[in-house]
Image: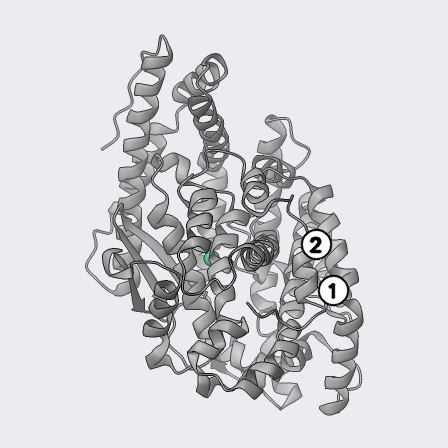
């Protein structure tokens, strides 16, 4: 598929030609990877040798030679589009070539395979992840919650040493590129730094503290729990504030989703975005199967959280649909991509769409006040992970179970328990957790702007046309923080999310 050649670049025209050729090959590999993953997930036939072939094809493109051409000509050409494209490719090559290091690839595969095959045990039986989540959220028997929470400990112990090794090696490789840690490299490439991130984290912590603490106390009293522990927190925070699942039946989910897009002016008939049911440990997934073929795999179930997931994936899908810049320029910082997904997901929560969904007025008015509770829990849970991850980048040799336990105690307001850091199946794709927090800042601020400028947002195409112009059709042709500012009229701030965490949900 990919052929390694010595690129003959001698001016702007040949550099463009070189980038276009590279882009076509990356697109072929990317779509082939998606088709393979889709076949694996959906139980369709696939060639088991395909993955290694695609890895080899990508390796043949991510060469030092190609990287050198991108770096050299990217700084010499005048065309701002080509310069931007070269900057993105330079960063992409740096990260990809680092991941190609055989020792690192070996570690990532070993850990990834173990995550995939390992299953927690509870009382001598295999515990499915969906069942574990149900227990953490709804199980009245506290000791059973504790045992389900502790079920990950053996995996944490087993993977501790190899996880340390993976963090250390990534750090070592990032140091060659001139960064203190791998985390700092990834943050810089995504357009932010630790100061920027932790500033918003601090605002979140401060803004949510009073309500968070009060509700925790209230719920702990209600359920007779004296000293809330990590295995109590989801149970206390994440079950009572939601509307009755009966208002969000699984069989109405897809029509409801498409009706929402149509009410916002989208012609869903002429967009090849399809939804398929799938039992995913992550809730859902959006796949770019081809340039005009976007597929959503999502869990089927009754309740607002299932609708939320389907809308979230639809946000990814619609973003991809309108993103028609070269393939390698479509890739975004995960903060921004997740922001586009959460932008769409928020429609499920606001009163205007709840009303159109047929949720009774008294249920809406209760939810306007309770919706902030699971969301502040979610942000604090994310940040507990982020803090532990950053501490591990700073010193992969430290006791990460202890610091994970401490960050959990601090942000979730529970007792300290050592927490098995290496049992968290996300460190193979590092520096992503913070994206889910920043995504909500982007979504809340964008919605606030649309309400101000385009209300009512349903029934006209203007609001989404604005979003398409600034966020979707541009691809990554300018830094995402600049696009957020251009779209909403101000730099990205915690302010609007903060309002949603302190006031009733807004009408629009
Ligand atoms: Zn997502």
Q: Is residue 302 left or right of residue 197?
A: left
Residue at position x 58%, y 87% from top?
139
Question: Can residue 192 be seen from the camera position used here?
Answer: yes
Q: Is residue 164 left or right of residue 66?
A: right
Q: In front here: 121 or 215?
A: 215
Q: CA distance from mark 1 to mark 2?
A: 9 Å
Residue 123 lies in what quarter of the image?
Answer: bottom right
> Which residue bears the numbered disc 2?
387
Q: Nearer the viewer, residue 187 or 424?
A: 187
- Disc 2 crowd, CA 10 A, few/some/many (<14, 14-19, 20+): many
Where residue 69 sits: x, y (%)? 41, 16
Identify the residue at image location x=28%, y=59%. 40
Where does label 1 land, which residue?
411
Secondary-structure class at tag 1: helix
Residue 95 vertical position relative to residue 348 in the rendered view, above or below: above
* Rendered position, 292 above or below 220: above
**Pointer 1 and pointer 2: residues touching (CB < 8 Å)?**
yes
The C terminus - image quarter: bottom right
């Amino acid at each position: 598929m990919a052929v390694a050649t010595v690129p003959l670049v001698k001016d702007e025209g040949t550099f463009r030609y070189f980038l276009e050729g590279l882009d076509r090959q990356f697109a072929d590999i990317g779509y082939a990877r998606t088709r393979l993953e889709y076949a694996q997930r959906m139980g369709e036939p696939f060639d088991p040798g395909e993955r290694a072939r695609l890895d080899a094809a990508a390796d043949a493109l991510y060469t030092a030679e190609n990287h050198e051409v991108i770096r050299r000509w990217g700084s010499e050409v005048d065309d701002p589009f080509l310069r931007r494209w070269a900057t993105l490719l330079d960063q992409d090559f740096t990260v990809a070539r680092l991941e190609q290091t055989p020792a690192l690839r070996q570690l990532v595969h070993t850990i990834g395979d173990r995550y995939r095959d390992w299953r927690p045990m509870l009382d001598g039986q295999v515990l499915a992840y969906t069942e574990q989540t149900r227990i953490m959220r709804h199980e009245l028997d506290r000791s059973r919650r504790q045992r389900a929470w502790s079920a990950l400990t053996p995996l944490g112990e087993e993977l501790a040493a190899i996880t340390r090794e993976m963090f250390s090696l990534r750090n070592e490789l990032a140091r060659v590129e001139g960064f203190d840690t791998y985390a700092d490299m990834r943050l810089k490439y995504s357009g932010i730094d630790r100061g920027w991130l932790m500033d918003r984290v601090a605002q979140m912590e401060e803004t949510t503290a009073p309500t968070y603490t009060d509700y925790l106390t209230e719920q702990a009293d209600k359920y007779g729990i004296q000293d809330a522990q990590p295995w109590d927190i989801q149970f206390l925070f994440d079950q009572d504030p939601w509307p009755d699942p009966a208002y969000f039946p699984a069989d109405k989910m897809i029509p409801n989703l498409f009706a929402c897009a149509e009410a916002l002016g989208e012609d869903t008939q002429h967009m090849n975005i399809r939804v398929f049911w799938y039992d995913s440990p992550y809730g859902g997934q959006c796949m770019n199967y081809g340039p005009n073929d976007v597929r959503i795999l999502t869990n089927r179930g009754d309740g607002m959280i299932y609708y939320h997931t389907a809308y979230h994936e639809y946000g990814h899908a619609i973003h991809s649909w309108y993103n028609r810049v070269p393939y390698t320029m479509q890739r975004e910082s995960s903060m921004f991509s997740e922001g586009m997904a959460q932008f769409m997901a928020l429609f499920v929560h606001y009163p205007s769409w709840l009303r159109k969904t047929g949720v009774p007025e008294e249920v809406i008015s209760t939810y306007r006040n309770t919706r902030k509770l699971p969301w502040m829990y979610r942000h604090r849970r994310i940040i507990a992970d982020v803090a532990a991850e950053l501490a591990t980048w700073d010193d992969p040799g430290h006791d990460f179970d202890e610091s994970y336990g401490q960050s959990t105690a601090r942000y979730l307001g529970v007792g300290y328990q050592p927490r098995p850091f290496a049992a968290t199946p996300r460190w193979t794709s590092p520096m992503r957790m913070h994206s889910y927090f920043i995504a909500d800042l982007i979504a809340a601020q964008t919605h606030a702007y649309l309400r101000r400028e385009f209300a009512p947002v349903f029934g006209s195409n203007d609001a989404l046309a604005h979003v398409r112009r600034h966020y979707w059709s541009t691809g990554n042709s300018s830094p995402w923080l600049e696009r957020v500012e251009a779209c909403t009229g101000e730099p990205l701030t915690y302010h609007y999310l903060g309002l949603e965490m302190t006031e009733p949900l807004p009408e629009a």
